[in-house]
């Protein structure tokens, strides 16, 4: 079992920055891949980026490439998403998720359905 809790969301003006955190508990954090997703009103949940147990990072979604940075601190059981140059279209609920499948440890998935544990989400609102 894995429990995930996001924090760090809020209201920010366009061009601003936020850092999201995802605190994990339960199963050993360093044993599974992690990902960030987001869901805007009326839209499907969107993959942003994922990271392996040894911090190998997938490609970022085109919409955030060059602005967002994922990282993980296995000693602190925490996943981060640094978001810079925020735009109004980044407004969404942001979720962290864990993929505990052994085969994904070093090759994190970009597929939403492959993630088996999810946090409750944190709202990010970017005003224009």
Image: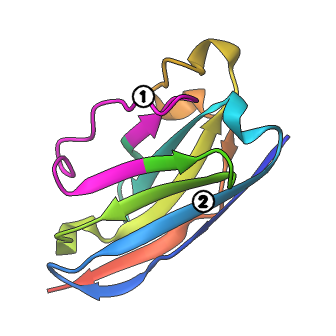
Q: Residues within 10 Å of mark 2 (few under 14, many from 20)?
A: many
- From the image, tell me which residue sits under label 2: 22
Which residue is nearer to you in this view: 104 or 112?
Answer: 104
Q: Which of marks 1 and 2 is nearer the N terminus?
A: 2
Tag of residue 56: 1
The alpha-carbon separation of the residues under discs 1 and 2 comes to: 18 Å
The residue shown at (22%, 80%) is 16
Q: Give the range drawn in magenta.
A: 49-70
Residue 44 visible, this angle: no
Q: What secondary structure prevails in the magenta region?
A: loop
The residue shown at (62%, 12%) is 103
Left or right? Give the position of 57 relative to 63. right
Which residue is nearer to you in this view: 41 or 80?
Answer: 80
Q: Which residue lies furthest to the front in this view?
A: 75
**Magenta-colored stretch includes residue 81:** no
Q: Which corner quadrant holds the N terminus?
A: top right
Tag of residue 117: none
Residue 118 visible, this angle: yes
Q: What element carries label 1?
A: loop
Q: x, y percentage for residue 99?
A: 63, 31
The residue shown at (47%, 25%) is 109
């Amino acid at each position: 079992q894995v429990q995930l809790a996001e924090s760090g969301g809020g209201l920010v003006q366009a061009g601003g920055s936020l850092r999201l955190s995802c605190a994990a508990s339960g199963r050993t954090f360093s044993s599974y891949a992690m990902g960030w997703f987001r869901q805007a009103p009326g839209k499907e949940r969107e993959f942003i980026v994922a990271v392996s147990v040894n911090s190998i990072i997938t490609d970022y979604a085109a919409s955030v490439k060059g602005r967002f940075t994922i990282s993980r601190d296995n000693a602190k059981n925490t996943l981060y998403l640094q978001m810079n140059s925020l735009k109004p279209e980044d407004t969404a609920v942001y979720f962290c998720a864990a993929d505990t499948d052994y085969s994904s440890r070093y090759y994190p998935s970009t597929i939403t359905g492959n993630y088996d544990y999810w946090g409750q989400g944190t709202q990010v609102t970017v005003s224009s």
